[in-house]
Amino acid sequence: MTHSIDPSLNRRKLRLSLRRARENAALSQREAAERVEWSQSKLIRVETGTVGVSVSDLRALLALYEVTDPERVQDLEEAARGSKGPSWWSGYHEVITPQFAQYLGYEGAATSLHTYHPIVVPGHLQTRGYAEALLAPRDLDEDVFQRVVDLRMERQQRMFDDSGRPACVFVLDEAAVRRQIGGKDVLGEQLDHLLALGSRPEVSVRVLPFEAGAHYSTLGSFVLLGFPDDDDLLYLEHAAGSMTGGEDLRLLARYQECLQVITDLALGEPESADLISRVRQDLGVR
């Protein structure tokens, strides 16, 4: 199953291309905005990818930046035409924060994803039964409850839809593998799902064993997204969620180092699959 290019991906292409073109033209955001008679805030929204760009506005910027290569101009004009409209997750607006919506746009453009979770199986890998059991204590309204679960399932389907993106490494703490969310039957189904996804060539499922001891991220989960044409992006998962990329290089570098340490401490893929299988067997479920 494949999907058409999401508007957020076109906005990202425009964001990167127009920012670099402006920098190559040696113009500040304020100077560029004044030249095309925009407010500076409008240009900032374009360069952060939070809004689409009309073809006429794009042409004004490209003329200012002296971008004249016909193929490049045509490519960006097509991106501008595709930058409008809702993203796939817009239908879940009632259960998504603006911060998480922005993250989903980045996630869809990433070529690699690395994540660690110390407590539960991350949403990318959850079965419907596991997700429902995990959310049950939150006492959500039934319609909100189902929308959150549906969002997780669609997100997962899109991530693993055989479209070739992204390459994923999931490091799960042993506690996440053993915690009986929803009881033995639900966990058994979830562990089967982990083994099935971990057998895919683009997916790596690793387990950080109890004996690994303390490390920097024992208190929380995080996601690192990789891009071939931009800085890595760090997403810290908590109630409000937070993202950082090039604007906080020290924190980003700290978590990149943390990821390397965790990966070095984790079991290899075959050993992780063996541990998951043993936990599955110990449950005594069919």
Image (tube, rainbow, N blue to C red):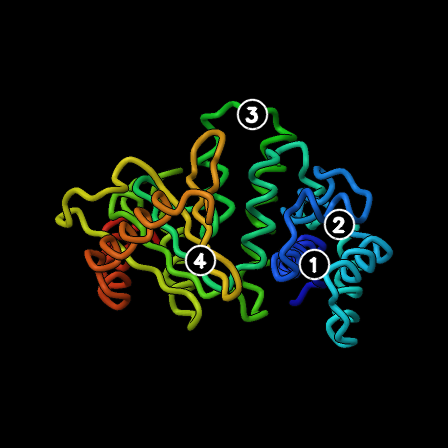
Tag 1: residue type? Answer: Asn
* Residue designated by label 1: 10
Q: CA distance from mark 1 to mark 3?
A: 34 Å
Q: Are marks 3 and 4 in contact (CB under 8 Å)?
A: no
- x and y, in percent, of residue 203 in the image: 41, 65
Q: Which residue is mark 2?
A: 52
Gap between marks 3 and 4 measured at Cα: 29 Å
Q: x%, y% of residue 58?
A: 79, 57
Residue depicted at 68% across the width and 63% down the height: 3
Residue 113, which numbered label?
4
Distance between mark 3 and mark 2 Cα atoms: 34 Å
The residue carrying mark 3 is 140
Q: CA distance from mark 1 to mark 2?
A: 8 Å
- Which comes before the other along the chain, label 1 or label 4? 1
Q: Is residue 68 left or right of residue 177?
A: right
Q: Is residue 192 among the parts visible in the rendering?
A: yes
Amino acid residing under circle 3: Leu
Q: Which amino acid type is shown beneath numbered disc 2?
A: Gly
Is 58 in front, or is 107? 58
Between 63 and 251, which is closer to the camera in this rendering?
Answer: 63
